[in-house]
Image (spheres, coloured by chain):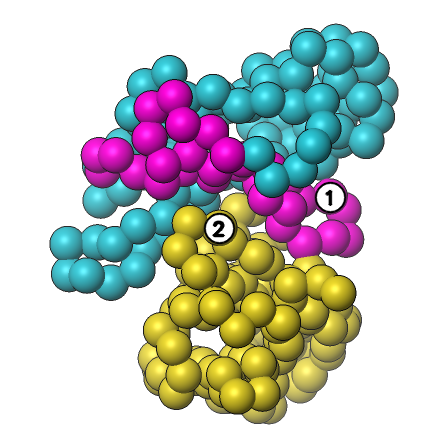
Amino acid sequence: QKEVEQDPGPLSVPEGAIVSLNCTYSNSAFQYFMWYRQYSRKGPELLMYTYSSGNKEDGRFTAQVDKSSKYISLFIRDSQPSDSATYLCAMTTGNQFYFGTGTSLTVIP
Amino acid sequence: SQTIHQWPATLVQPVGSPLSLECTVEGTSNPNLYWYRQAAGRGLQLLFYSVGIGQISSEVPQNLSASRPQDRQFILSSKKLLLSDSGFYLCAWWGFGTSGRVEQFFGPGTRLTVL
């Protein structure tokens, strides 16, 4: 079983839609949960991170962690064409990181 | 602020040739440094990480090696490249900023094609 599972998509939504991206994981020792955005041919950019369970909001982005279900989500409100990218989730216990394969998102104007 | 430099940006190498990719970090001391590989259509695969000079942890057995000769320098090497070594290689730094917030930065990456 993979440490982190993420639906690769692709996901295509109209501008203004609410986008939901999800990952599941198997290691209950993970403490930090991250979401990255990666544009084509660029390195990933850290969007948000959450420590332990709960929600975190930053502008149009909301990250949720449910440790009991081993499930994390990233919600994007009022999606924009500039949000079109690949979104990767990642988790860590400290030094080692485990990434999902990424979900490709296209927001259509 | 932290900056990660990687070079070269692109590289085309024949099978069996050696490889050396360099990563340097500015704006932080004693960083945790990582080498990742991202193959087409796949996620990030952790290759090596280092918590200090001379300290290397290998995650995936392969024909690659890493070294950390200086605090802010991380090098990825191979003596003989394989076709399967093609991919996008990313160096990354992870740690806590002055405010205590988690920070992670990725370098611009090296796109390696082995022919």
To which residue does mark 1 refer?
Answer: B39
Estimate how packed mark 2 is, as few (under 14), some (14 to 19) or many (20 or more) residues with alpha carbons within 10 Å.
some
Which quarter of the image is occupied by the C terminus of chain A? bottom right
Between residue A38 and residue A82, name the one nearer to us. Answer: A38
> In the image, which lettered chain appears cyan?
B
> In the image, which lettered chain appears yellow?
A
Secondary structure of the residue carrying numbered label 1 = loop
| Nearer mark to the viewer, of 1 and 2 | 2
Secondary structure of the residue carrying numbered label 2 = loop
Q: Which residues are magenta?
A: B28-57
Secondary structure predominantly adopted by residues drawn in magenta: strand
Answer yes or no: do the residues labelled 1 and 2 have beta carbons within 8 Å?
A: no
| Disc assigned to residue A96 | 2
Q: Is residue A49 magenta?
A: no
- Quarter of the image for residue B3 reads top left
Q: Is residue A92 above or below residue B59?
A: below
How far across and how far down the image is residue A74, in percent? 52, 80
Question: Would residue A12 be found to the left or right of residue A107 on screen?
Answer: right
Question: Would residue B52 be found to the left or right of residue A103 on screen?
Answer: left
Is residue B8 in view? no
Estimate how packed mark 1 is, as few (under 14), some (14 to 19) or many (20 or more) residues with alpha carbons within 10 Å.
some
- For badge 2, the amino acid type reads Gln
Between residue B34 and residue A38, name the one nearer to us. Answer: B34
Give the chain letter at badge 1: B
- Quarter of the image for residue B93 reads top left
Is residue A5 in view? yes
Residue at image position (73%, 73%) is A7
Which quarter of the image is occupied by the N terminus of chain A? bottom right
Residue at image position (75%, 12%) is B80
Residue at image position (48%, 68%) is A29
Residue at image position (75%, 31%) is B86
